[in-house]
Structures are given as C-alpha cells and as structure tokens.
Image (spheres, rainbow, N blue to C red):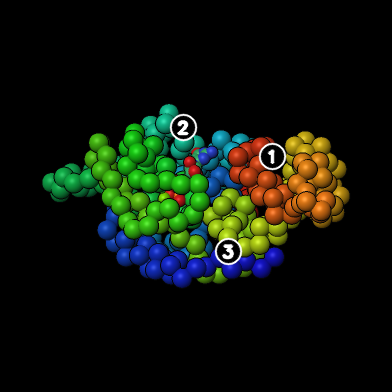
Amino acid sequence: MNIQWFPGHMTKALRMMEENVKLVDAIGYVLDARAPLSCFNPQFQSIVGNKPCVFVLNKCDLADPAKVDAWLNYFERRHQHSVRVSATASSDAGKIAAVFANATADLRKKYQAKGIFRPIRFMILGVPNCGKSTIINCLAGKKSVITGDRPGVTKGKQWVRLSGGLELLDTPGTLWPKFDDNTLAERLCFIGSIKDDVVDICEVAYALINQLQQLYPQQLGVRYGVDGLLPVGEVFEQIALKRGFLLRGGEMDSERCAKAILDDFRKGKLGKITFDLPPQE
Ligand SMILES: Nc1nc2c(ncn2[C@@H]2O[C@H](COP(=O)(O)OP(=O)(O)O)[C@@H](O)[C@H]2O)c(=O)[nH]1
Ligand SMILES: [Mg+2]
C-alpha cells in the first residue's frame, strides 16, 4: 500500500510547531493509545528539546488495556511523565491536570523564587485526530476549541486559559514527511490521522484486515461471523456478502464494505485494539 499522506499544509504546520515551542514551558504530547508509536514523531526530541513533556495516551476506551499498561511502564522506566485517559470522559480532567501540574512543579517553584507569576504554558501536540482539542475542552470543562471526527479541524493556533495557572495552546495536527515503516503509516490511516480521501479506502481496509489477522486473529470472526483467517481478499468478500454490501447487479460494493469495516474499528466494535508495542529497550 502506497500512502500519500503529506499534504502541503503540513509543512507549514510543522514549521509553526517549531516556532510555537519557543512560546511554551512544557509539552503535552497526545498519542492515540491504539497506535502510540505510529503517532510518535521521530524528530520530536530535536523539536522540543529539554522542555518537560507529558505523554497523554488518549482514546484508552478503545485501546487494549494490557498494551496501554506496557506503554505506561515503558514511560515510567524512562522517567517520563505519562497518563492514560479517554478525553471524551469529562471525569478524566483531574487526571490530566494532575500530571501536567506534576511535570511542571519544579518550573513553578523556580518562577515563584524569581517572583514571576504567570500561567504555565503547555503546547498540545500530536497527529491529526488524536484528540488534542478534546483534551483541552476536557480540561477547560467546556467547549473552548473545535473538535471533529476527522483530521484538519483545528486550523490556526488557539490559546485557552484555565483556572489553576495553566494556559494551553491547541495546535493543528502534524504528521512528518517520511515513514521508514509503511505498517505504521497504515495504522495512522486506521485511526483516522491520515484522511480517508487521500488514500484508497479499500486498500486501507485490506491493510486493517491483514494487521488484525496478525495481532487480534479472533476479532473478525467475532464481529462478522466469517472465517477471519482466510486470505484477506476472501475475508473482505465474505464480510460484504454477509452484510449485503452489494451493488444493483449483485456485484460487491467494495467501497461501502471498506467504510463499514473502518468505521467499526474506529468505533471500537472490533474490540479494544492496540497495534503498537513500546520499542524494545
Ligand atoms: N472514543 C474516544 N473518542 C475520542 C477521545 N478523544 C477524542 N475523541 C474523538 O476523536 C475525534 C478527534 O478529536 P479532536 O479533539 O478534534 O482531535 P484533534 O484533531 O487532535 O484536535 C473527535 O470525534 C473526538 O470526539 C477518546 O478519548 N475516546
Ligand atoms: Mg484539533
């Protein structure tokens, strides 16, 4: 599968991110808990330097809890701040606020000692659609910034001031120009970070079936009542038949089938799934 994911405006977004880093004290790096590694920009460290960073594993309601545990352990071993959340649940706001406060406690003390009293500024980073704006709204306790179930909803930058001396900068999602690993790029399509209209949606659905067969071999059978271990094309066809995704002449409606499979995955109907494991240490 050949993915053309890097639209022109991304270059601008990346450049903006580098500029914005200078304006903030700390980073909230949002990773989709279904594919944290795929969400991770390999150039991240060189962009943010030594500023405190919190890794927010979001959409945990859709992710595999055991693998999320593995990720939290990974961050802990590396003495990095991290937290598991579902930002659509307002009850997680306290958790996020606590880890943000914790990550900047030293900084706060330093400012206080110098007599500087201004909000601590966090920039919220992450790929499109990982839930950056939702996290900000969750923390704000109201809809302060626009969210959407597709990439590219947040356009310019937006500051949101919270009580408790915190200021958040919402940013448009950023991807990066190059992937060494096509599997990771495919995962960004599954989670909706790469727009469906720049890829062949049937190929994305095929890739999803293929990866599920390797990592969660039961799920396709459970959801669709098909033999999930058949060759990918046959699984796809069986799903189309079972669901009645047929065109007028009786031919398979591939596009509708592909959309349905992706939609099911995105809504968690194929189970709680996480594709990426933490890197080997
Ligand atoms: N299930 C689930 N959906 C979420 C969660 N957080 C965000 N979303 C949804 O993901 C979509 C993208 O969210 P948004 O905040 O606009 O992402 P952004 O592009 O990173 O700012 C929206 O439809 C949100 O409702 C979560 O924790 N769980
Ligand atoms: Mg947004």
> What residue do we see at 50% from left, 68% from top?
7
The reply to whether dot 3 and dot 2 touch (C-beta < 8 Å) is no
**Residue with the mark numbered 2:** 89
Mark 2, other Cα within 10 Å: few <14 / some 14–19 / many ≥20: few
**Image location of residue 118, percent across then percent down:** 18, 46
3 vs 2, front mark: 3
Comparing 27 with 186, the one in front is 186
Q: Earlier in the sequence, mark 3 or mark 2?
A: 2
Cα distance in 3D space between marks 2 and 1: 21 Å
Task: Characterize the local packing of mark 3: few (<14), some (14-19) or many (20 or more) Cα atoms within 10 angstroms.
Answer: few
Q: Disc 1 designates what residue?
A: 270
* Element marked by disc 1: loop
Distance from mark 2 CB to nearest ligand 1 atom below 8 Å: yes
Between residue 279 and residue 232, name the one nearer to us: 232
In this orientation, does residue 98 appear?
no
Q: Which mark is residue 25?
A: none
